[in-house]
Amino acid sequence: MADERSSSRPRKHKKKKESLEVLCRLTPYAGHDPAIRLYNETTVITSPPAGLLQRSGSPYPEALYNFGYVFDESESQQDVFDRSTLDMIEQVIRGKNGLLFTYGVTGSGKTYTMTGKETSKACGILPRAMDVLFNSLPCQTDRCVFYPDGRNGFEVRSEEDAAISRERIEELETEWNIRISGSKKVSGFNDGMVSAVFVSYVEIYNNLCYDLFDETLTDDRMNKSRDLRVNGSAVYVDNLTEIEVTSTEQVMELYVRAQERRKVAETILNKTSSRSHSIFNVRVVMAPCRSDCFHPVDDPNRMVIGQLSLVDLAGSERTKRTGNNGDRLVEAGKINQSLMALRQCFEKIRERDRNNVMAPIPYRDSKITHLFKNFFEGSGKIRMIVCVNPRPGDFEENLSYGSPTVLREDQVGEVEILSSEGKCSQFW
């Protein structure tokens, strides 16, 4: 991916009425005959490898896939962040929610897009989001004033109790400090409020939830799964560790340490292939400041919480490519089932947005969808970045039925089949 400078390619930033938007990012490809290439700023065109046949025995046709926007190889990490995530930060500091999925097969640039490298120009969405968030919160309380209540909410400690709690905290040593932090910020924070930032990290493996900030979590996962609970319209992971943070460096240190606990396995395609979905949650809690001191009012009814969830979806590579068997085969089956459940939720959201009717969303079919029930019901913006490697060997994988992004609608995976004359002959 380009990371040296912001691209000069003109981009249209259309107002989106839809609650769901799918974007595409093309990985740089130096080989010959790319199987997928940029057609225009919202469309990619497929060029099936010569001799490749569908199950029916017929050749794959050329096709156009439409997205909300397509990032080509010239566009930088900053470009991707600005288009995909920046407006979500603005919503979060106003007490609203944002949900961003990344999806792609092995080698598609998904990890690079989400976290990038430890330099200012190459860092990804997560560190950039945290930079903007902290820059945009001028009135952060002292640590330990807000604290999680265990029911998806927060409470306020007295100044005395907060001071005692701070004495018990071990300072987090960070190594993620070789870059220059970004200076960008967004507006919208209520200056009459004080705030704090908390992060949590959830893994969904074989449709069970695990706390990646749980330092006792071992590879066998024995008796460590967490249940989902419902609190009003929100669904949350029971007894989940939430850690208060005050800098991007702290966030990235926690993230890197937790990554070592994530379930990975060696496949033919990747020596450390993710066998699970992961959700990195950032929550901003805000409350009015007391008139007599710099301390939040202890009133749950006046508290506001905004949340950004960054979801790294496991890929759905097919068995014949990965060499999966035994446990790996079970894992692959669970991954594909959850991706199909996500796809079905996306299709119902499209139906709701297009027809302006409240279509039931089948979010209970999988943990990855149940956890985001409130988003699917309209409480927050949803985006997905589909990372695509144009190499011919990934052609069928990119078009896999298991992909949750093969959707048949404007700006969410519309597909046109091209006739030999290059004209649109039908829609799927």
Image (tube, rainbow, N blue to C red):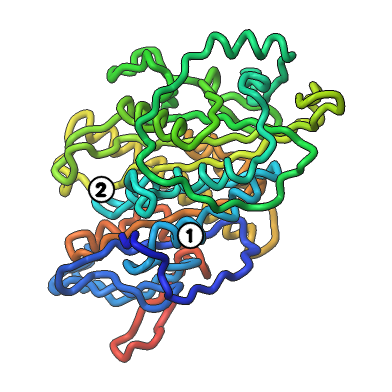
Q: Which amino acid does label 1 sit on?
A: Val
Q: Which residue is drawn at 40% across and 57% down?
A: 77
Q: Mark 2 points at which residue?
A: 317
Which numbered disc, 2 or 1, marks the residue that appears first in the sequence? 1
Label 1: how many Cα within 10 Å (few below 14, some 14–19, many 20+): many
The answer to whether one can see residue 62 in this image is yes
Q: What residue type is labelled 2?
A: Glu
Q: Residue at x 37, y 27 (%)?
A: 258
User: Where is residue 174 shown, x and y percent of the image?
Assistant: 39, 28
Q: Name the residue under label 1.
A: 22
Q: In this view, does 165 lie above or below 317?
A: above
In depth, the one of 119 and 263 nearer the eye is 119
Q: Residue at x 71, y 20 (%)?
A: 155
233 lies left or right of 199: right
User: Where is residue 363 shown, x and y percent of the image?
Assistant: 55, 41
In depth, the one of 144 and 379 nearer the eye is 144
